[in-house]
Amino acid sequence: MMNRPAATAAAIVVVAHLALAQQQAVLSVTATGSGELAVAIQPTFHLQYGCAYPLTYQFDLTGAPAGLNAWRKYHAAEAYTLLREQSGSAVFNAVEAARFDGASRRAYVSAAFSGESDSLFLKLTDSLGVPVPPRYLGISTYYDNRRAAVTVTADDWADWTEGWYPSLLGIFRRHGLYVSAGVISGAGNTGTQTWQGIQKQADLGFVEVVAHSRTHPYVPYAQPDSEVLGCAADIKKLSLPPLFSVHGVGYVYVWLAPYGEYDASTDSLLGVGHYLVPRLYTYAQAPMSPWIETTGHFGPVNPTLELGAPSWGGGDTSIASLNGTFDSIVAQGGVYHLMWHPQVIITDTARPYFTNHLGYISNRPDIWYVNLGHLYLYHMIQEMNGAGVSGVRVSAGTPQAYSLGQNYPNPFNPSTTIPFVLPEMTRTTIAVYNVLGQRVATLVDADVPPGSHEVRFDGTGLASGVYFCRMEAAHFVRTMKLMLIR
């Protein structure tokens, strides 16, 4: 089978530039001739990290009509679902939504990937349902293009603190504040009743269950595999909420280091366990941690400050200091990372510093309230696919580099579209192989002009399973995985 792509591209393809040196961009984004934006995520990355948190895709609305609607679907053949429109004055987080900003002429479309598909299709339509050609600008730095972010972490969830955790989490939940709470999961620390309490709080929402080791040891750990990997395995026995699980597979993104101590053994195991970020225990007003290529996770992050006054020192109970620090972080467009120990604040919940500060930092429509794990998951994908909205822009000009985009839809049945880009007239071959390395289809074998192109692969007559698409053009060779499902 062979299809020669037309000299004039019917689609404009964007493959985002690398921002994390150790990996390729994990998304390919294609504006199709039918007025859709097709987004495909690398299957392996999708499986490793779940990616169930909505990403915000930004569009330029200059010249677009009023009364727009935003839609999403996961498979080319299915019907679109209308995304709920939100206003700039509404407080919403962690949901699929569309917001149209008339002042900036921007649309912010927040949509999540499904566990059923590696593809996501987005569409804007006018009041009559006519598609509006998408002028895609990139993924917003923060969800819904918010001004700054707030995240909260908490330590020492175990049998001896279980009596305090429900009431404390209830207070933060009522303020709309998301808490990433560290569980000490080992036998003798967390028994059946505590696990039941943890499950209940996870079910109520706003709570990310994260790893705080099995025994809360000092470094070096006597059994590092058990402490780091075993704790995550214990947590994954819970029925984790949808944003932290896909088809029953749970994801633990955060390591809360006991005593804030950290060593090379712990560092290496976090990458093995697909953790995203370790949280230590030194206060710091720092930017997002960088990705560490050699370990496969972000570098350690510290909280901005601790709420309360622990007997071992540190913490903050000054209303002026707490609120002033928050204001400073927001003015910088940064992340305000509050942390607490249940045994420290349980007697302070009626004190002015506590009630004032939680009220001061909560329910702001220009702030992204988020669990620490989702903050870094979103950041990971956004950074891999353009540094802010200025980093990725759809353009009809001549591309500057060769690329092979992820097919969409993926999985597919029986056909799928494969985007590719050429910066110059080049002899190009694109073929599909089965897992035995046997060529099952030749899609392109021709001199192809520069530009952005698409080619379709029809898997009719082939068995379900994994296939590989290989592109060769000049010095460029790239292979990607396809999934055919009957």
Image (spheres, helix red, strand yellow):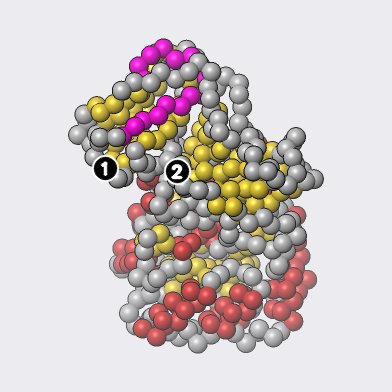
Measuring from the top left, give residue 247's x and y in whole percent: 37, 60
Residue pictured at 40% horizontal, 79% vertical: 195
Residue 148 in view: no
Residue in the picture at 48% in, 24% down: 453
Q: Quadrant of the C terminus?
A: top left
Q: Is residue 130 magenta?
A: no
Which disc, if any, is residue 152? none
In the shown orientation, is residue 55 left or right of residue 158? Answer: right
Q: Which residue is situated farthest in the right direction here?
A: 103
Which secondary structure class fits the magenta region best? strand
- The secondary element bearing badge 1 is classed as loop
Q: Looking at the rendering, which quadrant does residue 326 occupy?
A: bottom right
* Residue identified by numbered label 1: 464
Which amino acid lies under the numbered mark 1 shown in the image of this protein? Ser
Characterize the local packing of mark 1: few (<14), some (14-19) or many (20 or more) Cα atoms within 10 angstroms: some
In space, the residues marked 2 and 1 are separated at their CA atoms by 18 Å
Residue toward you, 253 or 279: 253
Disc number placed over residue 77 in the picture, else none? 2
Quadrant (top left, top right, bottom left, bottom right) of the N terminus = top left
Is 445 a magenta residue? yes
**Amino acid type at mark 2:** Ala
Q: Nearer the observer, disc 2 or disc 1? A: 2
Asked whether, in this view, residue 458 is left or right of residue 336, the answer is left
Q: Which residues are magenta?
A: 444-459
Image point (38%, 75%), residue name = 185
Query: Mark 2 or mark 1: which comes first in sequence?
Result: 2
